[in-house]
Structures are given as C-alpha cells and as structure tokens.
Amino acid sequence: MHVLLAYDGSDGARRALATVAALHHEGDVVTIVTSAEGVPLFGHAGTLPSPEQEEERHRDAIEAQTALAEHGMEAAVVKRHGDPATAILDEADKEGADLIVMGTRGISTAERWLVGSVSTKVLHHAHCSVLVAR
C-alpha cells in the first residue's frame, strides 16, 4: 500500500504520523508531503514561501522522516509550494497513493467558512481513501 502522509509539524500532523506508524505493514510505501504556502508576489501572479517557511517545512519533514525511521520505516519526502490541499491532492494523484493520512488543525467555524479546511477539501476531492487522525 502506498500511504501519503500530509505533514506540517502541527499536533494534528503528529497524530497522523503516529497513526501511519501504528498501521504500517511490511512493504508499505510512505511519502511525506509538506507544503509551504507563500505570500503574494508584487506584480506577479502566484506566491513564493519565505525562506523561514521553507526552513520550517524542511525541519517538519525531517522530523517526520526520523520518527518513521525509528519505527523501521523508510519514507520519501516531497516538498511542495502553494495551497496545502492542492499539494496533497496533486501528490496523491502523481504517486498513485492508496491512502492519505492527515490531521486536523482545529480552525474556527469562521475560518472554515471563509477559507475552508485542508482536511475537508482533501476528503471531498481525493481519488483514494482518506484517514483523518484526531
């Protein structure tokens, strides 16, 4: 089984990481995907993450990869830019993931109404099963 772990270093992501470790079977393939959403570029369409965001996501990915290695699991790391839900969905499609495992961030009702939650977007648009760790 190919498992895609959406990881951003949050408490919810750490719960998702623990879930992946607990459910792992011999032969499973794990891909850790992180995404740094950037700030708008002046005069250009699109965004670029700040160097601080890039560094934070790199540390997050290494943290997850190290934790999985401590459970005897190898994992590839993929760093993406832009909207996290889109990054997760695109990577799951590209890799042919069988399962996406992710946490929740606990955003407020107002925030969810204004921008939506990443987990909700992934649940509604993924081609494969999605496990949301709480």
Image (cartoon, rainbow, N blue to C red):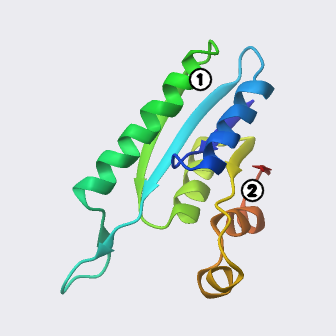
- Residue shown at the point (55%, 17%) measured from the top left: 69
Query: Which numbered circle lies on residue 11?
Result: none
Q: Quadrant of residue 60?
A: top left
Residue 64, compared with residue 55, is above or below; it is: above
The amino acid marked with disc number 1 is Leu
Residue 113, compared with residue 38, is above or below; it is: below
The amino acid marked with disc number 2 is His
Query: Which numbered circle lies on residue 127?
Result: 2
Rate crowding at label 1 as few (under 14), some (14 to 19) or many (20 or more) other CA atoms within 10 Å. Answer: some
Residue 50, compared with residue 55, is above or below; it is: below
Q: Is 3 placed left or right of 65 in the picture?
A: right
- Residue shown at the point (73%, 68%) measured from the top left: 120
- Which structural element holds mark 2? loop
Query: Which numbered circle lies on residue 68?
Result: 1
- Which structural element holds mark 1? helix
The image position of residue 123, as x and y in percent, is 76, 62
Where's the N terminus, which quadrant? top right
